[in-house]
């Protein structure tokens, strides 16, 4: 049997040496992703921010703190899931975070595709618009905005088996607009229900 941990480590090495888009020039550290290689739940964010770039780990800043609270709503801890991003290096403009560019997404998503294949999750939670539209499109759905589809469950029957895609708001959305927090928490209750259904 292939060892998922080893395979993910090798991929992370590849990402460390990657120069496929301009972002390698400005990164401090690439952020391949981390978590439980044998999980059935994969979380996909947008891209590393300031703290992620410094530490080489996903969701370690303010959004990560809120994410931990949201995971708890679903009965999960960080060690239960695998977390990665659409982009593995931080996109910046004048020292600040900026959204990913289409050419960066094109260059980087083969790594995400490999991670999905290695982990073979039963549930993919996409966090925010970039992960949501990429993943919906990849599995044959219309690439809708997260505002339209958050908390819905998309069922996939692929060669990899049965899988559910659950689009969710990016945790940072709750930090920028505090009234959003309740909506986001509700969606994570839905995630909990889906996990429980999967156990039966
Ligand atoms: N936002 C993301 O999308 N990913 C991270 O890893 C951190 C913040
Ligand atoms: Fe390579 Fe992705 Fe980093 Fe660009 S963002 S350099 S494609 S790992």
Image (cartoon, grey):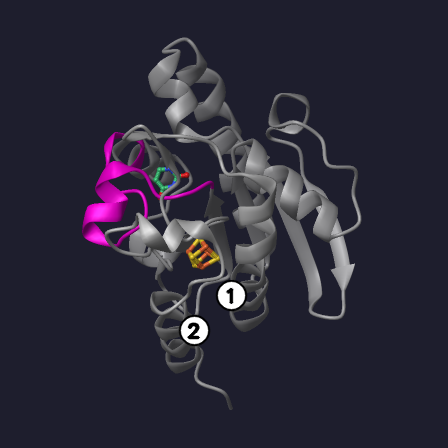
Going by the picture, which residue comes out furthest to the top? 179
Specify the quadrant that holds the C terminus. bottom right
The answer to whether the beta carbon of the residue marked 2 is less than 8 Å from any atom of ligand 2 is no
The answer to whether the beta carbon of the residue marked 1 is less than 8 Å from any atom of ligand 2 is no
Name the residue rendered at 42%, 30% in the picture. 98
Up the image or down, 32 lies above or below 85; here it is below
Region in magenta? 46-64
Name which quarter of the figure residue 132 lies in: top right
Question: As rendered, which of 184 and 51 lies closer to the eye?
Answer: 51
- 10 Å neighbourhood of mark 1: few (<14), some, or many (≥20)? many
Question: As rendered, which of 190 and 181 lies closer to the eye?
Answer: 181
Q: Which residue matches tag 1?
A: 115
Query: Residue 16 location, x and y as percent?
Result: 34, 67
Q: Secondary structure at mark 1?
A: helix
Name the residue rendered at 19%, 51% in the picture. 55
Residue 127 is left or right of residue 90, and the answer is right
Q: Which label's residue is closer to the chain start, 2 or 1? A: 2
Query: Residue 48 location, x and y as percent?
Result: 35, 43
């Amino acid at each position: 049997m292939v060892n998922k941990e080893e395979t993910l480590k090798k991929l992370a090495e590849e990402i460390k040496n990657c120069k496929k888009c301009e972002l390698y020039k400005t990164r401090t550290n690439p952020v391949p992703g981390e978590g439980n290689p044998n999980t059935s739940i994969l979380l996909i964010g947008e891209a590393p921010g300031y703290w992620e770039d410094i530490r080489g780990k996903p969701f370690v800043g303010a959004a990560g703190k809120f994410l931990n609270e949201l995971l708890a709503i679903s009965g999960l801890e960080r060690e239960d899931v695998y977390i990665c991003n659409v982009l593995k290096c931080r996109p910046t403009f004048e020292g600040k975070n900026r959204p990913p560019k289409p050419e960066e997404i094109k260059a980087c998503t083969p790594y995400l595709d490999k991670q999905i294949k290695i982990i073979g999750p039963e549930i993919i939670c996409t966090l925010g618009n970039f992960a949501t539209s990429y993943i919906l499109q990849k599995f044959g759905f219309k690439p809708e905005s997260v505002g339209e589809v958050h908390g819905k469950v998309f069922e996939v029957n692929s060669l990899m088996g049965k899988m559910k895609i659950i689009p969710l708001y990016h945790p940072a959305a709750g930090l920028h607009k505090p009234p959003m927090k309740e909506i986001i928490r509700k969606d994570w209750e839905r995630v909990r229900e889906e996990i429980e259904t999967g156990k039966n």
